[in-house]
Image: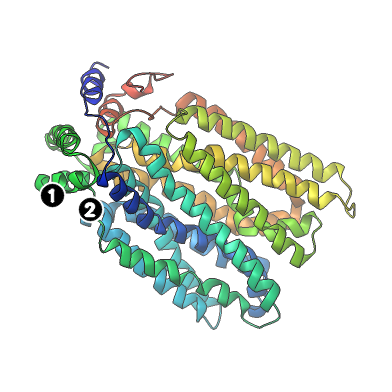
Amino acid sequence: MTTAQPANLRESKLPPLKPGPHRKRLGLISVIASFGGLLFGYDTGVANGAERPMQLELGLTDIGLGVVISSLVFAAAVGALFGGKVSDAIGRRKTIILLSIMFFLGTVMVVTAPGFTLLVAGRIMLGLAVGGASTVVPVYLAELAPLEIRGSITGRNELAIVSGQLAAFVMNAIIGNVWGHIDGVWRIMFALCAIPAIFLFVGMLRMPESPRWYVEKGRNDKALEVLKTVRSEDRAIAELADIERIASEEQKEVKVGLGAIFANKWLLRIVLVGMGVAMAQQLTGINSIMYYGQRILIDAGFAENAALIANIAPGVVAVIGGLIALRNMDRLDRRTTFAIGLTLTTTFHVLIGIASIVLPEGMEARPWILLVLIVGFVFSMQTFLNVAVWVWLAEIFPLHMRGLGIGISVFFGWTVNGFLALYVPTLIEATGITGTFFMFAGVGVLALIFVITQVPETRGRSLEALEQDVTTGAVYTFPSKKGRK
């Protein structure tokens, strides 16, 4: 418990952030890297609107459609697990460049697929890229950002994700209503994914590597060189000293990776908590809306084309919620944000379930009331949960296992997401909106209890100070107020 105090004292003596070209450079890096999040969002959101014409053209059953949609998600689980390990080995920047190539190749495979087999293969390629991006991009941004604005910098990736989903919904609505009568219209929807993949590839060629990864590999001179491009010189030197000190202490440990996790009960615990946070995020059912929103709205009472247009509304409020979340990310504790988010999302689950029972089918207002409640759920999710979850996961793990820790956590989150993607069409068909959302509400209560009792705070702490407290177990003192700004 005593090791955290020196870290906090050093943390408080860091020179303050200063304006200058380095701040603009950091902003540019975050924009370029967030194209990975944009691709994540578009590739997961494009199926919402493309899935119905794709199912009709290829003659897919509901379970066949579930396989096509969920193949990306299950592959994303694998991509998340190995993406972190690859980034630990070859660097965050090189890994993101590799992922941009995979995004492009996967898009080509899907667009040119003559049938089910190549379509699924393309979706798997995209899933590996999506999963890799979901772990590597937040870590890259967190390791480059100063602690005072780390939440808002890292959270830009989640804003890019929901912006990508909104772009997919808007383009689907335009393409579907203008060219919906053309065979293969869903291929046009998917083809647009290639554009941000090219931007990500070209942009990352000019971006720096993570300074913390350089230190982990013993290239401290390169780390300082990068830090001086995104900090004032005195701040860069002070931060490098802290990073070097923690890295030096880590090198005294014999075990790294999985060996280190199983040898230290506190590291094992934080990995289990990370898994729980990632799974709780998915079990809210947010991606059921993002993947099958049109189908849910049709079940609510909208006509098919009207549902395609109405489906834009959740995408719009997701972006608005993401902007609000960025503003609050360095103002509200992560734990507080999680608790507010799960309380609101669970409340909306219950309201949607009740409304679908009380409001009779055929009632003119029924689809609109359900749409408002669904929009409220998405807004709550994006404002208080999604950005905070990805930021927290990028912050909480020690440097020597950061890629592995977030990879394991997100692997379990994506696996839960995959099962939902596979079975939600069948679930909606069997139980309708009522049973589906009541199920999500029950899980939401359990997730809220878990967050309150198990999730440690990370806001206002340097990554190095957090690393010490996670390793010793000091971070599990609830509520954590140490080192707060």
Q: How many marks?
A: 2
Residue 16 image offset from top left, x and y in percent: 26, 29
Q: Is residue 317 left or right of residue 93?
A: right
Q: Residue at x 50, y 71 (%)?
A: 192
Categorize mark 2 by other alpha carbons within 10 Å: few (<14), some (14-19), many (20+).
Answer: some
The residue at which mark 2 appears reads as 209
Q: Who comes first in sequence, dot 2 or dot 1?
A: 2
Q: Which mark is residue 222?
A: 1
Please say if the residues under marks 2 and 1 sit with CB atoms less than 8 Å apart.
yes
Q: Is residue 464 left or right of residue 237?
A: right
Categorize mark 1 by other alpha carbons within 10 Å: few (<14), some (14-19), many (20+).
Answer: some
Residue 416 image offset from top left, x and y in percent: 52, 49
Secondary structure type for disc 1? helix
Residue 60 in view, yes or no = no
Q: Residue at x 90, y 51 (%)?
A: 363
Q: Is residue 430 left or right of residue 225?
A: right
Label 1 amino acid? Lys
Q: Residue at x 57, y 30 (%)?
A: 340
* Residue 406, placed above or below residue 333: below
- Residue 477 sits in which quadrant? top left
